[in-house]
Amino acid sequence: MSILEEISGALQQGRAPKVKELVAQAIGEGLQPKAILEDGLIAGMTVIGEKFKINEVFVPEVLIAARAMNAGIAELKPHLSQDDMKAKGKIVIGTVKGDLHDIGKNLVKLMMEGRGLTVVDLGVDISAEEFVEAAVENEADIICCSALLTTTMGEMQNVVELRNSKGLDGKVKIMIGGAPITQVYCDHIGADGYTADAASAADMALAFCG
């Protein structure tokens, strides 16, 4: 087994100290930092995402794997060049105005970061104006809106309409998700994407940024 496969495997098991140790070893052996990042750490997190989709792993395992990934990145960071660290895309994410739920949002953020995307987390109770302003400020590729309450879903339409009125519909995609959201609703309000789970959201975001 190659050391990159070992890094991926240790990350999937959530073994943060082992991931850190293997990353240091890989650097010592002269492996390219970008390869360690993409073929070791991100590859491992991608497997976790796929397993999460099909209920082979659950939220606690995702959180532990993410912690192991962060340990590996901390060890790797001093060796990464600006080019290596260039993210595959930038996302602003938040829970819509009137809604204080954040577990789903936090999971999506973890999955997206695990795939090499930069995520700016705006938090909860975020208005359409705050979403669009943050997207412009951060030069984001995608706005991700989460809602758990049917009473707050309407704010997603406000985000889409505000983006369009600012002439950003060709530049910034809008993805939506949460328990009450459906593809029908996504199509109805003119959002660009909906997924039913966090791992699929990361896949879609990568495709949009690619």
Image (cartoon, rainbow, N blue to C red):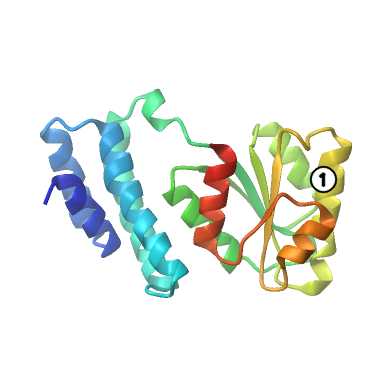
Residue under the point 38% across and 57% down = 66
Q: Is residue 21 above or below residue 176?
A: above
Closest to the observer, 50 or 119: 50
* Kind of residue at disc 1: Glu
Residue under the point 57% across and 38% down = 209
Residue under the point 13% across and 47% down = 2
The secondary element bearing badge 1 is classed as helix
Q: Is residue 51 left or right of residue 167?
A: left
Quadrant position of residue 31: top left
Q: Look at mark 1 in the image and give the residue it sits on.
A: 129
Task: Mark 1: give few (<14), some (14-19) or many (20+) Cα within 10 Å.
Answer: few
Residue 88 placement (x, y as % from top left): 49, 36
Residue under the point 78% across and 64% down = 185
Q: How many marks?
A: 1
Closest to the observer, 204 or 128: 204
Is residue 176 visible in the rendered structure shown here? yes
Closest to the observer, 32 or 1: 1
Is residue 74 visible in the rendered structure shown here? no
Q: Is residue 66 left or right of residue 197?
A: left
Residue 118 placement (x, y as % from top left): 52, 41
Q: Is residue 119 left or right of residue 185?
A: left
Quadrant position of residue 186: bottom right
Residue 193 placement (x, y as % from top left): 68, 53
Q: Is residue 168 above or below residue 142?
A: above
Residue 102 placement (x, y as % from top left): 62, 65
Quadrant position of residue 141: top right
